[in-house]
Amino acid sequence: MDIKDNAKNTDTWLRGFFILVFGVIFYFLYLVIWLLVIFQFITKLLTGELNSNLEQFSTKMTSYALQILNYITYQSEERPFPFSPFPEGNIGAQRPKLEEKSPKKSDEKERTKIKHFLDPAWFVNLSLN
């Protein structure tokens, strides 16, 4: 096929139209996700815990955003919601719990190693040796 045939292909133009539409939807979804992030942070700051309902909603929104990105970047031929089912996300998966622990000596040694590694003088000494 040559360029003229490609330009006349209605499937390509239809895909381009949906890329624009879902790009706009993604832009607004991006703003919604940032609002969720901010609200979840404030909730964690004030209560010390995450809002589980908001966490489930966030999972669905990020799954939908991924569904859109996969379509507009040609990673998937399936059109996102509302042309396909709304993604449920990975709600049933258990996320790792953050453990509260007291620092051990080995942790302090590791922090010291990292601190030395991040010290600019360490790089200078390394390059001079």
Image (cartoon, rainbow, N blue to C red):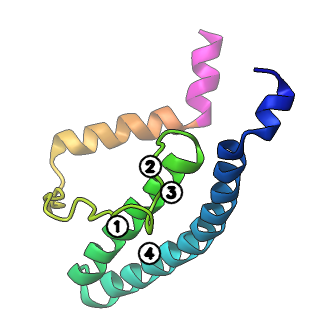
The x, y position of residue 59, in whole percent, is: 32, 67
Among the two numbered marks 2 and 4 on one chain, the one whose residue lies closer to the N terminus: 4
Q: Type of residue at label 4? A: Val
Question: Residue at coordinates 69% horizontally, 43% vertically from top-left?
Answer: 12
For the record, the magenta segment spans 120-129
Question: Residue at coordinates 51% horizontally, 78% vertically from top-left?
Answer: 32
Kindly report the distance in space between the C-alpha atoms of the residues bearing marks 1 and 2. Answer: 12 Å
Q: Type of residue at label 2? A: Glu
Of tags 4 and 3, which is closer to the observer?
A: 3
Kindly report the distance in space between the C-alpha atoms of the residues bearing marks 1 and 3. Answer: 11 Å
Question: Residue at coordinates 59% horizontally, 49% vertically from top-left?
Answer: 72
Among the two numbered marks 1 and 2 on one chain, the one whose residue lies closer to the N terminus: 2
Looking at the rendered structure, which numbered label has been put on residue 37? Answer: 4
Residue underneath mark 2: 78
Above-or-below relation of 36 to 18: below
**Neighbourhood count class around disc 1 (C-alpha, 10 Å): few under 14, some 14–19, many 20 upward:** some
Above-or-below relation of 120 to 30: above
Among the two numbered marks 4 and 1 on one chain, the one whose residue lies closer to the N terminus: 4
**Neighbourhood count class around disc 4 (C-alpha, 10 Å): few under 14, some 14–19, many 20 upward:** some
Looking at the rendered structure, which numbered label has been put on residue 68? Answer: 3
> Mark 1: which secondary structure?
loop
